[in-house]
Structure formats: structure tokens, C-alpha cells
Image (spheres, rainbow, N blue to C red):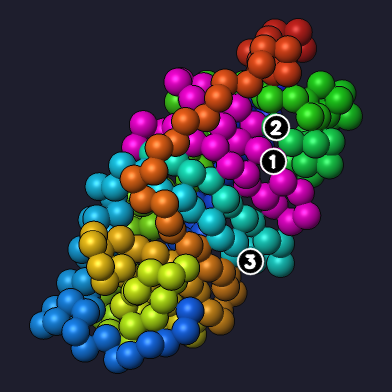
Amino acid sequence: MRTRKVTTAVAAASASVALLAGCGGDSGDGSKAFEGQSADSVAAKAVEATRKAASMHVKGDTRQEDGSTVSIDVSVDREKNCEGTIGAGDTEAEVRHTGSTLYLRGDRQYWENALKQQSEAGEMVPELADKWVRMPGNDATTAGVCDKQGFIAAMDEDKSERRGMERGETSEVDGEKALKLTKKGDGGETLAMYVATEGEPYILRTTTEGGENPGSVTFSDYGEPVEPEQPPAGETVDLKGLGTRSS
């Protein structure tokens, strides 16, 4: 039971991270970028190029309906190798996925927040705090964090969100030229996608301004190797073992 409860708590945080991509200074009118192509066509090509990329770095944050902030800062590839951090409010945890195993390390405050709805939290937190918690790599906890392809699929689940977009001006995102595509959402928010104009048409940034869930996510380091190290055995806690001890 304890194994399932911990896994469920982390999975909920990871699922929230997937919402991050729900949807620089200006330097021209963008007339030469993707000349003759509609905004919707550019958006579709950007999603496809990003999906095919071998790896990428994802960093951003978004505000949830309860006013809290969810953040992500991870490097991930198509084989689900990943490392970085995920955060909720004022707490943060390190995450690694290597081989077939997911590792998560948070401090006492992180686990107290993650397990605050669990009656056994007082007993579990000391066993988890500051340890690398080892979980099955095929668990739902990887959703939106260490599953690059799943992350992109979640972004593009509702394809209508990238239809009816308008071409904007060219901008720079971390030094790379990008064409800005925009659209007004049903809730009054403004959605924007910045697409690289040189090389592959990767998504470089998505933003949501206004509405209930504003946020921004930046994508970079496409094609860079992601090689997380397996944590030392003495610094890990196996959820399966934890569950066995509590049964």
C-alpha cells in the first residue's frame, strides 16, 4: 500500500508538469521566415520536428488553479534518459531516469508536501527524505517528465489549439531566431509558439499569457547527449522494499 501511495503522489506532480506546455526582443516582421506558409502549417512542422528530435532540454513554469506553481528543468531523450529537477510551490526534487529505473530525490519538505494527504506520511517521510527513491521506469510517474515522446504527445493532444494561429514577428529566443505564432484561447488567454527559423523548425518556446494558467516553457539543447548517472546504492531507497516492510 505504501509503495502505491508514494507512486501515486509523485505521479500526480508529474502529470501537472505535463500541463506546462499547454498550449526576446522583436527584430523584424518575419516575412522571410517560412515564406508562403501559413501559421498552422508552420506550427504542425514545429511539433513534428520537435517530436523527431533525439533529445532536448525543457525548462519552464506554470501557475495552477489553486495558485501554486509547477516547474520543470530537465534534459530528456527519446530513450527516456533524463535528469534535472521538478518543483511544486517552494519545494523541488531532483529526478533521474536511466536504464529502466526512475530515481527521485527530495528533501523532507518536498515529501511532506507530496504526502500530506496520506495518513502514514509521518512514518514515511524520514525514510524518503534526501534519498534517491527508486521506482519502476515504466511507472506513470515518468509521464510528462522523463518520457520525451509522451511529453510532446501531451502538448499536442488537442490539435485544435494550434489551428487558427496567426504569424507574428521574428524574435530571438536565447540567441536563436524564431517566428512567433499566436492565438487567442477560449478563456481569454494568448497562446504563443516560437519556432526556429534556421535549421530544423524546432519549438523554442511556448507561452500562455492571461487566463487561469499563465506560464512559459523554453526548449533548447536539441540533439545533445543525455547521460544521467545511476545514484550510489547507499543513497537509494527501493519503493518495493519499503512497501514490503510496511505490509
Q: Main secondary structure of the magenta part?
A: strand
Secondary structure of the residue carrying numbered label 2: strand
**How far is the residue under mark 2 from the one under mark 3?**
23 Å
Mark drawn on residue 231: none
Residue 105 numbered mark, or none = 2
Q: Position of residue 198 (x, y in %)?
A: 25, 68
* Left or right relative to 1: residue 26: left
At label 1, the amino acid type is: Ala
The answer to whether mark 1 and mark 2 are in CB contact below 8 A is yes
Q: CA distance from mark 1 to mark 2?
A: 5 Å
Tell me which numbered mark, 2 or 3, is placed earlier along the sequence. Answer: 3
User: Which mark is first along the chain, 1 or 3?
Assistant: 3
Q: Which residue is mark 3?
A: 63
3 and 1 marks in contact (CB < 8 Å): no
Bin the neighbour count of mark 1 within 10 Å (Cα to Cα): few under 14, some 14-19, many 20 and up. some
| Farthest-out residue, left | 36
Residue at far front of view: 175
Q: Which residues are magenta?
A: 78-104
Q: Residue at x 17, y 72 (%)?
A: 41
The disc placed on residue 93 is: 1
In the image, 40: left or right of 131? left
Residue plotted at (58% across, 52% down): 72
State whether residue 126 is above or below residue 154.
Answer: above
Q: Residue at x 71, y 62 (%)?
A: 68
Magenta span includes 204: no
Q: Give the amino acid at mark 2.
A: Arg
* Residue 199 in the image, given as x and y percentages of width and height: 23, 62
